[in-house]
Image (spheres, rainbow, N blue to C red):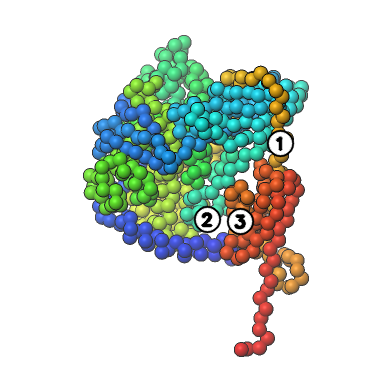
Amino acid sequence: METGNQSARTQVKKQMRARKSFSSALFFLILGIGIPSFVGLMGAQAKTVFDEPVLMSSNLQIGSTSTYTPTSLSVSSPSLSPSSTSLVVSTSSSSTPLKLYAFIQAPTGPVTRPFVILTAFASIPRTISVVIRGFVNTQEFICTQSPCAIYLQNSSRFVFRAYADTGESSDEVIASVNVVQGQDGFSVNIDSVNQFTTFGDSCAQTWGVEDEIGSQWDNFVQFPYQLNTKKTLHVLATKLILNGIVDTSGCAAGGLSLGLDWPTACGLERASGAMIEWQNQYDEYIWMSSKEQGIPPKVVKTLIEIESQFWPGNERFYVDEYGLGQINQLGVDVLLRRDPTLYQNVCSGLNLDCLRPYVSLEPQQQAQVRGAVVGLADASCANCPYGLDLGKAKESVSLISMLLKANCQQVDVMLGTNLEDATYDDLWRFTLASYHSGISCFQDAVKATRKDKLPVTWENLGERLNCSGGKDYVNGFMDRLSSFDLYLYQPSDAQAVIAAATIVPTRTPVPTPTVYISSAQVKVQVFMDRNGNGSPDADEWIDAMTVLLSTSSNEQVTQRTQNGIAIFDMSGYTPGINVTVSLPGLYRSESFVLPEQGEISVTFMFEQPALPTILP
Protein backbone atom coordinates (compact mmCIF):
# COMPACT_ATOMS: atom_id res chain seq x y z
CA MET A 1 0.00 0.00 0.00
CA GLU A 2 1.34 3.44 -0.87
CA THR A 3 1.97 6.03 1.83
CA GLY A 4 0.13 9.37 1.73
CA ASN A 5 3.15 11.14 0.21
CA GLN A 6 3.62 8.53 -2.49
CA SER A 7 -0.05 8.66 -3.35
CA ALA A 8 0.07 12.45 -3.67
CA ARG A 9 3.15 12.32 -5.89
CA THR A 10 1.52 9.67 -8.08
CA GLN A 11 -1.58 11.84 -8.43
CA VAL A 12 0.52 14.86 -9.44
CA LYS A 13 2.33 12.78 -12.07
CA LYS A 14 -0.98 11.57 -13.51
CA GLN A 15 -2.35 15.11 -13.68
CA MET A 16 0.76 16.41 -15.44
CA ARG A 17 0.75 13.48 -17.87
CA ALA A 18 -2.90 14.18 -18.70
CA ARG A 19 -2.10 17.80 -19.53
CA LYS A 20 0.69 16.64 -21.83
CA SER A 21 -1.21 13.96 -23.74
CA PHE A 22 -2.61 16.33 -26.33
CA SER A 23 0.67 18.20 -26.87
CA SER A 24 2.51 14.88 -27.30
CA ALA A 25 0.13 13.76 -30.01
CA LEU A 26 0.41 17.16 -31.68
CA PHE A 27 4.20 16.92 -31.57
CA PHE A 28 4.17 13.61 -33.45
CA LEU A 29 1.81 15.06 -36.03
CA ILE A 30 3.71 18.29 -36.68
CA LEU A 31 7.29 17.17 -36.40
CA GLY A 32 6.78 13.88 -38.14
CA ILE A 33 8.77 11.73 -35.78
CA GLY A 34 7.11 8.70 -37.24
CA ILE A 35 8.03 9.56 -40.83
CA PRO A 36 9.57 6.43 -42.35
CA SER A 37 12.51 8.39 -43.70
CA PHE A 38 13.49 9.20 -40.15
CA VAL A 39 13.39 5.66 -38.76
CA GLY A 40 16.71 4.66 -40.21
CA LEU A 41 18.40 7.97 -39.54
CA MET A 42 19.11 7.84 -35.85
CA GLY A 43 22.18 5.89 -34.84
CA ALA A 44 24.83 6.18 -32.18
CA GLN A 45 25.59 9.80 -31.36
CA ALA A 46 28.79 9.81 -29.45
CA LYS A 47 31.22 7.35 -27.93
CA THR A 48 32.93 7.38 -24.62
CA VAL A 49 36.63 7.88 -24.08
CA PHE A 50 36.55 7.27 -20.31
CA ASP A 51 40.15 6.53 -19.34
CA GLU A 52 40.88 4.08 -22.12
CA PRO A 53 44.40 4.12 -23.53
CA VAL A 54 43.22 5.32 -26.93
CA LEU A 55 44.80 8.40 -28.50
CA MET A 56 42.28 10.83 -29.91
CA SER A 57 42.85 11.82 -33.52
CA SER A 58 45.40 14.59 -33.96
CA ASN A 59 44.27 15.28 -37.52
CA LEU A 60 42.09 18.22 -36.56
CA GLN A 61 39.73 19.61 -39.16
CA ILE A 62 40.44 23.05 -40.53
CA GLY A 63 37.64 25.43 -39.57
CA SER A 64 37.03 29.07 -38.95
CA THR A 65 37.79 31.02 -35.83
CA SER A 66 34.42 32.67 -35.69
CA THR A 67 32.01 32.17 -32.83
CA TYR A 68 28.57 30.88 -32.01
CA THR A 69 25.63 32.30 -30.14
CA PRO A 70 22.77 29.86 -29.59
CA THR A 71 19.97 32.39 -29.77
CA SER A 72 20.96 34.29 -32.91
CA LEU A 73 22.99 32.91 -35.76
CA SER A 74 24.08 34.09 -39.15
CA VAL A 75 25.71 31.43 -41.28
CA SER A 76 27.47 31.83 -44.59
CA SER A 77 29.55 29.59 -46.85
CA PRO A 78 27.28 26.60 -46.13
CA SER A 79 28.35 23.03 -46.66
CA LEU A 80 26.68 19.66 -46.68
CA SER A 81 29.27 18.40 -44.26
CA PRO A 82 31.26 20.47 -41.76
CA SER A 83 34.42 18.71 -42.85
CA SER A 84 34.23 19.89 -46.44
CA THR A 85 34.11 23.68 -46.17
CA SER A 86 34.83 26.20 -43.46
CA LEU A 87 31.80 27.55 -41.63
CA VAL A 88 31.48 31.22 -40.72
CA VAL A 89 29.17 32.12 -37.86
CA SER A 90 28.49 35.68 -36.75
CA THR A 91 27.58 36.45 -33.16
CA SER A 92 26.60 40.04 -33.67
CA SER A 93 22.92 40.56 -32.92
CA SER A 94 20.97 43.34 -31.34
CA SER A 95 18.55 40.77 -29.93
CA THR A 96 21.31 38.98 -28.04
CA PRO A 97 22.92 41.48 -25.66
CA LEU A 98 26.32 40.75 -24.24
CA LYS A 99 26.17 39.69 -20.60
CA LEU A 100 28.92 40.05 -18.02
CA TYR A 101 29.27 38.08 -14.82
CA ALA A 102 31.52 38.72 -11.80
CA PHE A 103 32.15 36.60 -8.69
CA ILE A 104 34.17 36.57 -5.49
CA GLN A 105 35.80 33.44 -4.06
CA ALA A 106 37.75 32.66 -0.87
CA PRO A 107 40.54 30.08 -0.64
CA THR A 108 39.90 26.86 1.23
CA GLY A 109 41.81 26.02 4.39
CA PRO A 110 44.39 28.15 6.19
CA VAL A 111 46.64 30.38 4.06
CA THR A 112 49.89 32.16 4.92
CA ARG A 113 48.56 35.47 3.58
CA PRO A 114 44.83 36.21 3.39
CA PHE A 115 43.37 36.90 -0.04
CA VAL A 116 40.24 36.54 -2.16
CA ILE A 117 39.91 35.77 -5.87
CA LEU A 118 37.76 37.85 -8.21
CA THR A 119 36.68 36.43 -11.56
CA ALA A 120 34.68 37.81 -14.46
CA PHE A 121 33.66 36.57 -17.88
CA ALA A 122 31.55 37.59 -20.85
CA SER A 123 28.78 35.51 -22.38
CA ILE A 124 30.68 35.68 -25.68
CA PRO A 125 34.40 34.95 -25.17
CA ARG A 126 37.28 36.56 -27.07
CA THR A 127 35.20 39.39 -28.49
CA ILE A 128 35.87 42.06 -25.84
CA SER A 129 38.20 43.11 -23.07
CA VAL A 130 36.79 42.69 -19.55
CA VAL A 131 38.13 44.37 -16.40
CA ILE A 132 36.97 44.30 -12.79
CA ARG A 133 36.75 47.59 -10.89
CA GLY A 134 35.54 48.32 -7.40
CA PHE A 135 36.36 49.09 -3.80
CA VAL A 136 37.75 47.04 -0.95
CA ASN A 137 36.69 49.07 2.07
CA THR A 138 37.54 52.64 0.90
CA GLN A 139 40.38 51.62 -1.43
CA GLU A 140 39.72 51.51 -5.16
CA PHE A 141 41.18 48.66 -7.23
CA ILE A 142 41.22 47.41 -10.82
CA CYS A 143 41.84 43.92 -12.20
CA THR A 144 42.89 43.82 -15.83
CA GLN A 145 42.98 40.01 -15.84
CA SER A 146 40.62 37.35 -14.59
CA PRO A 147 41.00 35.68 -12.21
CA CYS A 148 42.85 38.15 -10.00
CA ALA A 149 43.86 38.05 -6.34
CA ILE A 150 43.32 40.82 -3.79
CA TYR A 151 45.37 40.47 -0.64
CA LEU A 152 43.78 41.57 2.63
CA GLN A 153 45.00 43.02 5.90
CA ASN A 154 41.85 42.12 7.84
CA SER A 155 38.12 41.60 7.41
CA SER A 156 36.85 43.71 4.52
CA ARG A 157 33.84 44.82 2.51
CA PHE A 158 33.80 44.59 -1.30
CA VAL A 159 31.76 46.39 -3.91
CA PHE A 160 32.70 45.71 -7.55
CA ARG A 161 31.52 45.08 -11.11
CA ALA A 162 32.90 43.69 -14.35
CA TYR A 163 33.16 46.17 -17.21
CA ALA A 164 33.53 45.60 -20.95
CA ASP A 165 35.31 47.96 -23.30
CA THR A 166 32.07 48.08 -25.30
CA GLY A 167 30.21 49.72 -22.41
CA GLU A 168 28.41 46.79 -20.75
CA SER A 169 28.75 46.02 -17.06
CA SER A 170 27.78 43.18 -14.75
CA ASP A 171 25.45 43.37 -11.79
CA GLU A 172 27.07 44.94 -8.75
CA VAL A 173 28.57 42.46 -6.30
CA ILE A 174 28.51 43.37 -2.61
CA ALA A 175 30.26 41.03 -0.20
CA SER A 176 31.58 40.87 3.36
CA VAL A 177 34.81 38.90 3.91
CA ASN A 178 35.94 37.69 7.32
CA VAL A 179 39.64 37.10 8.09
CA VAL A 180 40.70 35.22 11.22
CA GLN A 181 44.28 34.40 12.18
CA GLY A 182 44.94 30.99 13.74
CA GLN A 183 47.91 28.81 14.60
CA ASP A 184 48.07 27.34 11.08
CA GLY A 185 47.62 30.63 9.24
CA PHE A 186 44.73 32.80 8.13
CA SER A 187 41.20 31.59 7.55
CA VAL A 188 39.26 33.54 4.91
CA ASN A 189 35.48 33.22 4.65
CA ILE A 190 32.83 35.09 2.72
CA ASP A 191 30.18 35.92 5.30
CA SER A 192 27.64 37.34 2.87
CA VAL A 193 27.23 38.12 -0.81
CA ASN A 194 24.24 39.66 -2.57
CA GLN A 195 24.21 37.22 -5.51
CA PHE A 196 21.54 34.59 -5.82
CA THR A 197 20.49 32.75 -8.99
CA THR A 198 17.33 30.67 -9.29
CA PHE A 199 17.42 27.47 -11.36
CA GLY A 200 14.69 25.39 -12.90
CA ASP A 201 15.40 21.79 -13.91
CA SER A 202 13.87 21.84 -17.40
CA CYS A 203 13.96 18.05 -17.76
CA ALA A 204 12.23 17.46 -14.42
CA GLN A 205 9.57 19.97 -15.47
CA THR A 206 9.16 18.20 -18.82
CA TRP A 207 8.75 14.82 -17.12
CA GLY A 208 6.54 16.13 -14.34
CA VAL A 209 8.66 14.47 -11.64
CA GLU A 210 11.04 15.57 -8.91
CA ASP A 211 14.29 14.27 -7.49
CA GLU A 212 12.73 12.48 -4.53
CA ILE A 213 16.05 11.09 -3.30
CA GLY A 214 17.72 14.49 -2.97
CA SER A 215 20.85 13.66 -4.98
CA GLN A 216 23.71 16.16 -5.00
CA TRP A 217 24.61 15.71 -8.66
CA ASP A 218 21.57 17.58 -9.98
CA ASN A 219 22.01 20.63 -7.74
CA PHE A 220 22.61 23.99 -9.39
CA VAL A 221 25.74 25.65 -8.01
CA GLN A 222 25.51 29.37 -7.31
CA PHE A 223 29.00 30.16 -8.62
CA PRO A 224 30.99 28.70 -11.55
CA TYR A 225 34.05 27.97 -9.42
CA GLN A 226 31.97 25.46 -7.45
CA LEU A 227 32.30 23.21 -10.51
CA ASN A 228 36.12 23.17 -10.40
CA THR A 229 37.48 19.63 -10.27
CA LYS A 230 40.86 17.96 -9.88
CA LYS A 231 40.79 14.76 -11.91
CA THR A 232 43.52 12.66 -13.44
CA LEU A 233 42.60 12.32 -17.11
CA HIS A 234 45.02 10.28 -19.19
CA VAL A 235 43.74 11.21 -22.64
CA LEU A 236 43.87 14.90 -21.73
CA ALA A 237 47.40 14.54 -20.32
CA THR A 238 48.49 12.86 -23.56
CA LYS A 239 47.05 15.71 -25.61
CA LEU A 240 48.75 18.32 -23.45
CA ILE A 241 52.11 16.59 -23.87
CA LEU A 242 51.77 15.95 -27.62
CA ASN A 243 50.88 19.59 -28.29
CA GLY A 244 53.78 20.98 -26.26
CA ILE A 245 51.57 22.56 -23.61
CA VAL A 246 53.44 20.55 -20.98
CA ASP A 247 57.24 20.25 -21.05
CA THR A 248 58.22 16.62 -20.47
CA SER A 249 61.73 16.86 -21.90
CA GLY A 250 63.13 15.54 -18.63
CA CYS A 251 61.02 12.39 -18.76
CA ALA A 252 62.09 9.16 -20.43
CA ALA A 253 60.52 8.78 -23.89
CA GLY A 254 59.11 12.28 -23.57
CA GLY A 255 56.65 11.26 -20.88
CA LEU A 256 54.61 9.05 -23.23
CA SER A 257 54.28 5.36 -23.94
CA LEU A 258 55.98 3.90 -27.01
CA GLY A 259 52.74 4.18 -28.94
CA LEU A 260 52.41 7.86 -27.96
CA ASP A 261 48.92 7.09 -26.70
CA TRP A 262 49.35 7.04 -22.92
CA PRO A 263 51.28 9.18 -20.40
CA THR A 264 53.99 7.63 -18.27
CA ALA A 265 54.11 8.30 -14.54
CA CYS A 266 56.64 11.08 -15.16
CA GLY A 267 54.52 12.62 -17.92
CA LEU A 268 51.41 12.48 -15.79
CA GLU A 269 53.17 14.22 -12.92
CA ARG A 270 54.49 16.99 -15.20
CA ALA A 271 51.02 17.47 -16.71
CA SER A 272 49.20 17.67 -13.37
CA GLY A 273 48.97 21.45 -13.05
CA ALA A 274 48.02 22.07 -16.69
CA MET A 275 45.51 19.21 -16.51
CA ILE A 276 43.66 20.89 -13.63
CA GLU A 277 43.67 24.28 -15.32
CA TRP A 278 42.51 22.85 -18.65
CA GLN A 279 39.56 20.85 -17.28
CA ASN A 280 38.24 23.89 -15.39
CA GLN A 281 38.50 26.53 -18.11
CA TYR A 282 34.98 25.75 -19.40
CA ASP A 283 33.22 25.92 -16.03
CA GLU A 284 31.92 29.47 -16.47
CA TYR A 285 30.21 28.52 -19.73
CA ILE A 286 28.91 25.27 -18.28
CA TRP A 287 27.36 27.31 -15.47
CA MET A 288 25.88 29.85 -17.89
CA SER A 289 24.41 27.24 -20.26
CA SER A 290 23.02 25.34 -17.29
CA LYS A 291 21.25 28.45 -16.05
CA GLU A 292 19.83 29.24 -19.49
CA GLN A 293 18.80 25.72 -20.55
CA GLY A 294 17.85 24.26 -17.16
CA ILE A 295 20.28 21.35 -17.30
CA PRO A 296 22.16 20.46 -14.07
CA PRO A 297 25.73 21.76 -14.53
CA LYS A 298 27.39 18.65 -13.11
CA VAL A 299 25.62 16.60 -15.78
CA VAL A 300 27.02 18.86 -18.51
CA LYS A 301 30.57 18.78 -17.15
CA THR A 302 30.51 15.01 -16.67
CA LEU A 303 29.32 14.55 -20.25
CA ILE A 304 32.20 16.67 -21.57
CA GLU A 305 34.67 14.70 -19.45
CA ILE A 306 33.42 11.36 -20.74
CA GLU A 307 33.08 12.38 -24.38
CA SER A 308 36.31 14.34 -24.89
CA GLN A 309 38.17 14.73 -21.59
CA PHE A 310 37.90 18.49 -22.23
CA TRP A 311 40.01 18.41 -25.41
CA PRO A 312 37.70 19.74 -28.17
CA GLY A 313 39.12 17.66 -30.98
CA ASN A 314 37.33 15.75 -33.72
CA GLU A 315 36.98 12.00 -34.10
CA ARG A 316 36.63 9.70 -37.08
CA PHE A 317 34.82 6.65 -35.78
CA TYR A 318 31.81 5.18 -37.62
CA VAL A 319 30.41 8.73 -37.71
CA ASP A 320 32.17 12.10 -37.64
CA GLU A 321 32.08 13.57 -34.13
CA TYR A 322 33.05 17.11 -33.20
CA GLY A 323 34.15 19.12 -30.21
CA LEU A 324 33.74 18.85 -26.47
CA GLY A 325 30.52 16.82 -26.65
CA GLN A 326 31.53 14.71 -29.67
CA ILE A 327 28.45 15.92 -31.52
CA ASN A 328 27.45 14.53 -34.91
CA GLN A 329 24.73 15.05 -37.51
CA LEU A 330 22.63 12.17 -36.21
CA GLY A 331 22.49 13.81 -32.80
CA VAL A 332 21.61 17.32 -33.94
CA ASP A 333 18.69 15.94 -35.95
CA VAL A 334 16.84 15.43 -32.65
CA LEU A 335 17.63 19.01 -31.62
CA LEU A 336 16.49 20.54 -34.90
CA ARG A 337 13.18 18.69 -34.67
CA ARG A 338 12.69 19.92 -31.11
CA ASP A 339 13.99 23.48 -31.42
CA PRO A 340 12.42 25.47 -34.29
CA THR A 341 14.16 28.66 -33.09
CA LEU A 342 17.60 27.16 -33.60
CA TYR A 343 16.52 25.84 -36.99
CA GLN A 344 15.31 29.27 -38.10
CA ASN A 345 18.49 31.00 -36.93
CA VAL A 346 20.71 28.54 -38.77
CA CYS A 347 18.50 28.25 -41.84
CA SER A 348 18.44 32.02 -42.39
CA GLY A 349 22.08 31.94 -43.52
CA LEU A 350 21.85 28.88 -45.77
CA ASN A 351 19.83 30.23 -48.72
CA LEU A 352 16.98 27.80 -48.06
CA ASP A 353 13.21 28.22 -47.87
CA CYS A 354 13.05 28.74 -44.11
CA LEU A 355 9.24 29.02 -44.11
CA ARG A 356 9.27 25.25 -44.44
CA PRO A 357 9.87 23.36 -41.16
CA TYR A 358 13.02 21.29 -40.85
CA VAL A 359 11.17 17.96 -41.19
CA SER A 360 9.65 18.98 -44.53
CA LEU A 361 12.98 19.86 -46.18
CA GLU A 362 14.54 17.61 -48.78
CA PRO A 363 17.08 15.12 -47.31
CA GLN A 364 19.97 17.03 -48.87
CA GLN A 365 18.72 20.31 -47.39
CA GLN A 366 18.29 18.70 -43.97
CA ALA A 367 21.88 17.48 -44.19
CA GLN A 368 22.96 21.01 -45.03
CA VAL A 369 21.27 22.41 -41.93
CA ARG A 370 22.65 19.61 -39.73
CA GLY A 371 26.13 20.25 -41.10
CA ALA A 372 25.86 23.92 -40.19
CA VAL A 373 24.85 23.11 -36.60
CA VAL A 374 27.55 20.47 -36.18
CA GLY A 375 30.04 23.01 -37.50
CA LEU A 376 29.30 25.17 -34.47
CA ALA A 377 30.91 22.49 -32.30
CA ASP A 378 33.98 22.16 -34.53
CA ALA A 379 36.73 24.04 -32.68
CA SER A 380 39.55 23.04 -35.01
CA CYS A 381 41.54 26.02 -36.28
CA ALA A 382 44.68 25.84 -38.43
CA ASN A 383 45.98 29.24 -37.31
CA CYS A 384 45.19 28.94 -33.59
CA PRO A 385 47.49 27.71 -30.81
CA TYR A 386 47.37 23.90 -30.53
CA GLY A 387 45.10 23.85 -33.60
CA LEU A 388 42.05 24.74 -31.46
CA ASP A 389 39.79 27.76 -31.22
CA LEU A 390 39.13 27.61 -27.49
CA GLY A 391 36.73 30.56 -27.62
CA LYS A 392 34.52 28.65 -30.02
CA ALA A 393 34.82 25.54 -27.86
CA LYS A 394 33.55 27.48 -24.85
CA GLU A 395 30.59 28.82 -26.79
CA SER A 396 29.70 25.32 -28.00
CA VAL A 397 28.93 24.26 -24.41
CA SER A 398 25.50 25.83 -24.82
CA LEU A 399 24.85 23.52 -27.79
CA ILE A 400 25.61 20.50 -25.58
CA SER A 401 23.05 21.65 -23.00
CA MET A 402 20.51 22.20 -25.76
CA LEU A 403 21.11 18.67 -27.04
CA LEU A 404 20.59 17.18 -23.58
CA LYS A 405 17.38 19.16 -23.19
CA ALA A 406 16.12 17.96 -26.58
CA ASN A 407 16.86 14.35 -25.68
CA CYS A 408 15.05 14.52 -22.35
CA GLN A 409 12.04 16.03 -24.16
CA GLN A 410 12.21 13.23 -26.71
CA VAL A 411 12.28 10.65 -23.90
CA ASP A 412 9.13 12.22 -22.48
CA VAL A 413 7.34 11.96 -25.83
CA MET A 414 8.36 8.36 -26.47
CA LEU A 415 7.44 7.04 -23.04
CA GLY A 416 4.03 8.70 -22.88
CA THR A 417 2.01 7.26 -20.00
CA ASN A 418 4.78 4.73 -19.24
CA LEU A 419 6.75 7.64 -17.83
CA GLU A 420 5.14 6.94 -14.47
CA ASP A 421 7.03 3.65 -14.15
CA ALA A 422 10.43 5.40 -14.07
CA THR A 423 12.14 7.33 -11.30
CA TYR A 424 13.84 10.70 -11.79
CA ASP A 425 17.22 8.93 -11.98
CA ASP A 426 15.85 6.44 -14.51
CA LEU A 427 14.65 9.24 -16.76
CA TRP A 428 18.10 10.81 -16.76
CA ARG A 429 19.56 7.41 -17.66
CA PHE A 430 17.13 7.22 -20.57
CA THR A 431 18.23 10.68 -21.69
CA LEU A 432 21.90 9.71 -21.59
CA ALA A 433 21.15 6.51 -23.48
CA SER A 434 19.39 8.55 -26.15
CA TYR A 435 22.30 11.02 -26.36
CA HIS A 436 24.91 8.29 -26.67
CA SER A 437 23.20 5.51 -28.64
CA GLY A 438 20.63 7.50 -30.59
CA ILE A 439 16.90 7.91 -30.18
CA SER A 440 16.15 4.99 -32.53
CA CYS A 441 18.10 2.57 -30.34
CA PHE A 442 16.35 3.90 -27.24
CA GLN A 443 12.96 3.54 -28.90
CA ASP A 444 13.70 -0.09 -29.80
CA ALA A 445 14.57 -0.79 -26.16
CA VAL A 446 11.30 0.81 -25.01
CA LYS A 447 9.32 -1.35 -27.45
CA ALA A 448 11.12 -4.51 -26.30
CA THR A 449 10.41 -3.69 -22.65
CA ARG A 450 6.72 -3.10 -23.34
CA LYS A 451 6.53 -6.26 -25.45
CA ASP A 452 7.75 -8.24 -22.44
CA LYS A 453 5.01 -6.53 -20.38
CA LEU A 454 7.54 -5.06 -17.96
CA PRO A 455 7.59 -1.61 -16.34
CA VAL A 456 9.75 0.83 -18.32
CA THR A 457 12.51 1.28 -15.73
CA TRP A 458 16.25 1.42 -16.30
CA GLU A 459 16.68 -2.03 -14.78
CA ASN A 460 14.39 -3.50 -17.44
CA LEU A 461 15.19 -1.21 -20.37
CA GLY A 462 18.97 -1.36 -19.89
CA GLU A 463 18.91 -5.12 -20.45
CA ARG A 464 17.18 -4.53 -23.78
CA LEU A 465 19.41 -1.70 -24.99
CA ASN A 466 21.16 -3.52 -27.81
CA CYS A 467 23.35 -0.71 -29.15
CA SER A 468 27.04 -1.38 -28.57
CA GLY A 469 28.28 0.02 -25.27
CA GLY A 470 25.01 1.81 -24.49
CA LYS A 471 24.32 0.24 -21.10
CA ASP A 472 27.93 0.51 -19.93
CA TYR A 473 28.06 4.15 -21.06
CA VAL A 474 25.01 5.09 -18.99
CA ASN A 475 26.08 3.14 -15.89
CA GLY A 476 29.59 4.57 -16.08
CA PHE A 477 28.19 8.08 -16.53
CA MET A 478 25.98 7.79 -13.45
CA ASP A 479 28.86 6.38 -11.40
CA ARG A 480 31.00 9.40 -12.29
CA LEU A 481 28.13 11.74 -11.64
CA SER A 482 27.55 10.27 -8.18
CA SER A 483 31.23 10.73 -7.29
CA PHE A 484 31.51 14.25 -8.77
CA ASP A 485 31.80 16.02 -5.41
CA LEU A 486 34.72 13.80 -4.36
CA TYR A 487 36.89 15.59 -6.94
CA LEU A 488 35.87 19.18 -6.21
CA TYR A 489 38.84 21.52 -6.21
CA GLN A 490 39.31 24.96 -4.71
CA PRO A 491 42.54 26.98 -4.62
CA SER A 492 44.70 27.01 -1.53
CA ASP A 493 47.74 29.08 -0.64
CA ALA A 494 50.10 26.77 -2.54
CA GLN A 495 48.21 26.98 -5.84
CA ALA A 496 47.30 30.67 -5.77
CA VAL A 497 49.56 31.88 -8.56
CA ILE A 498 47.16 34.51 -9.87
CA ALA A 499 47.64 38.03 -11.19
CA ALA A 500 47.23 40.61 -8.43
CA ALA A 501 44.88 43.57 -8.58
CA THR A 502 46.20 47.09 -9.07
CA ILE A 503 45.39 49.47 -6.23
CA VAL A 504 44.29 52.89 -7.48
CA PRO A 505 45.73 55.83 -5.48
CA THR A 506 42.89 57.37 -3.52
CA ARG A 507 42.35 61.04 -4.32
CA THR A 508 39.25 61.49 -2.17
CA PRO A 509 38.07 58.90 0.33
CA VAL A 510 34.99 57.15 -1.05
CA PRO A 511 32.72 55.50 1.51
CA THR A 512 31.81 51.92 0.81
CA PRO A 513 28.12 51.16 1.28
CA THR A 514 27.25 49.01 4.24
CA VAL A 515 26.53 45.47 3.14
CA TYR A 516 23.00 44.37 3.95
CA ILE A 517 22.18 40.80 3.05
CA SER A 518 19.17 38.92 4.32
CA SER A 519 19.54 35.66 6.21
CA ALA A 520 15.81 35.17 6.65
CA GLN A 521 13.71 32.22 5.63
CA VAL A 522 10.04 31.97 4.69
CA LYS A 523 8.05 29.09 6.14
CA VAL A 524 4.78 28.37 4.31
CA GLN A 525 2.18 26.08 5.88
CA VAL A 526 -0.88 24.72 4.07
CA PHE A 527 -3.58 22.68 5.80
CA MET A 528 -7.24 21.70 5.62
CA ASP A 529 -9.08 22.62 8.83
CA ARG A 530 -11.38 19.60 8.92
CA ASN A 531 -12.37 19.91 12.59
CA GLY A 532 -12.84 23.68 12.49
CA ASN A 533 -10.46 24.46 15.36
CA GLY A 534 -8.48 26.99 13.31
CA SER A 535 -5.12 25.25 13.74
CA PRO A 536 -3.38 22.40 11.89
CA ASP A 537 -3.62 18.90 13.30
CA ALA A 538 -1.43 15.94 12.34
CA ASP A 539 -3.79 14.63 9.65
CA GLU A 540 -4.70 18.01 8.16
CA TRP A 541 -1.48 18.98 6.32
CA ILE A 542 -1.75 19.22 2.50
CA ASP A 543 1.10 17.60 0.58
CA ALA A 544 2.39 18.35 -2.93
CA MET A 545 0.75 21.79 -2.98
CA THR A 546 2.64 24.16 -5.32
CA VAL A 547 3.81 27.35 -3.59
CA LEU A 548 5.13 30.31 -5.61
CA LEU A 549 7.40 32.95 -4.08
CA SER A 550 7.80 36.15 -6.15
CA THR A 551 10.00 39.16 -5.39
CA SER A 552 9.81 42.78 -6.49
CA SER A 553 13.14 42.15 -8.29
CA ASN A 554 11.25 39.86 -10.73
CA GLU A 555 12.57 36.57 -9.35
CA GLN A 556 10.34 33.55 -8.83
CA VAL A 557 10.92 30.36 -6.87
CA THR A 558 8.53 27.41 -6.75
CA GLN A 559 8.38 24.61 -4.20
CA ARG A 560 5.93 21.90 -3.26
CA THR A 561 4.82 21.29 0.28
CA GLN A 562 6.09 18.26 2.14
CA ASN A 563 4.02 17.37 5.20
CA GLY A 564 2.18 20.62 4.50
CA ILE A 565 5.29 22.81 4.73
CA ALA A 566 7.55 24.56 2.20
CA ILE A 567 10.60 26.52 3.36
CA PHE A 568 12.29 29.17 1.19
CA ASP A 569 15.85 30.17 2.08
CA MET A 570 16.17 33.90 1.37
CA SER A 571 19.93 34.08 2.01
CA GLY A 572 21.52 36.49 -0.43
CA TYR A 573 18.38 38.51 -1.14
CA THR A 574 18.37 42.22 -0.30
CA PRO A 575 16.36 43.19 2.78
CA GLY A 576 13.52 45.58 2.06
CA ILE A 577 12.32 43.99 -1.18
CA ASN A 578 8.66 43.07 -1.47
CA VAL A 579 7.88 39.35 -1.38
CA THR A 580 4.61 37.68 -2.35
CA VAL A 581 3.81 34.08 -1.46
CA SER A 582 0.90 32.53 -3.35
CA LEU A 583 -0.83 29.28 -4.23
CA PRO A 584 -1.11 29.42 -8.05
CA GLY A 585 -4.62 28.88 -9.33
CA LEU A 586 -6.19 29.00 -5.86
CA TYR A 587 -6.25 32.81 -5.45
CA ARG A 588 -4.48 32.71 -2.13
CA SER A 589 -1.55 35.07 -1.54
CA GLU A 590 0.23 37.05 1.13
CA SER A 591 2.78 39.85 0.75
CA PHE A 592 5.41 41.27 3.09
CA VAL A 593 8.72 43.14 3.16
CA LEU A 594 11.76 40.90 3.51
CA PRO A 595 13.59 41.50 6.82
CA GLU A 596 17.33 41.11 7.40
CA GLN A 597 16.91 37.97 9.46
CA GLY A 598 14.45 35.71 11.19
CA GLU A 599 11.61 33.47 10.03
CA ILE A 600 8.50 34.72 8.29
CA SER A 601 5.60 32.35 8.73
CA VAL A 602 2.82 32.28 6.13
CA THR A 603 -0.17 30.01 6.73
CA PHE A 604 -2.88 29.12 4.23
CA MET A 605 -5.89 27.43 5.82
CA PHE A 606 -8.64 25.75 3.82
CA GLU A 607 -11.96 25.17 5.54
CA GLN A 608 -13.91 21.95 5.21
CA PRO A 609 -16.80 22.54 2.78
CA ALA A 610 -20.14 22.72 4.51
CA LEU A 611 -22.40 19.77 3.71
CA PRO A 612 -26.12 20.41 3.02
CA THR A 613 -28.47 19.40 5.82
CA ILE A 614 -31.37 18.60 3.50
CA LEU A 615 -31.63 17.36 -0.05
CA PRO A 616 -32.51 20.05 -2.61
Is residue 107 positioned above or below 11 on the image? above
Residue to which mark 2 is pinned: 209
Dot 1 or dot 3: first in sequence order is: 1
Seen in the picture, residue 307 relative to 547 is either above or below; the reply is: above
Residue tagged by mark 3?
548
Give the residue displayed 73% in from the left and 65% down from the top.
536
Query: Which element carries disc 2, helix, strand or loop?
Result: loop
Mark-to-mark CA distance, 2 and 3: 17 Å
Q: Which mark is residue 515?
A: 1
Residue located farthest toward the top when viewing the structure as drawn: 250
Q: CA distance from mark 1 to mark 2?
A: 39 Å
Give the amino acid type for the residue marked by disc 1 in the picture.
Val
Q: Quadrant of residue 86?
A: top left
Residue 494 location (% of width, % of height) = 62, 20
* Spatial CA span between label 1 and label 3: 28 Å
Between disc 1 and disc 2, the foreground one is: 1
The residue depicted at 40 percent of the width and 35 percent of the height is 92
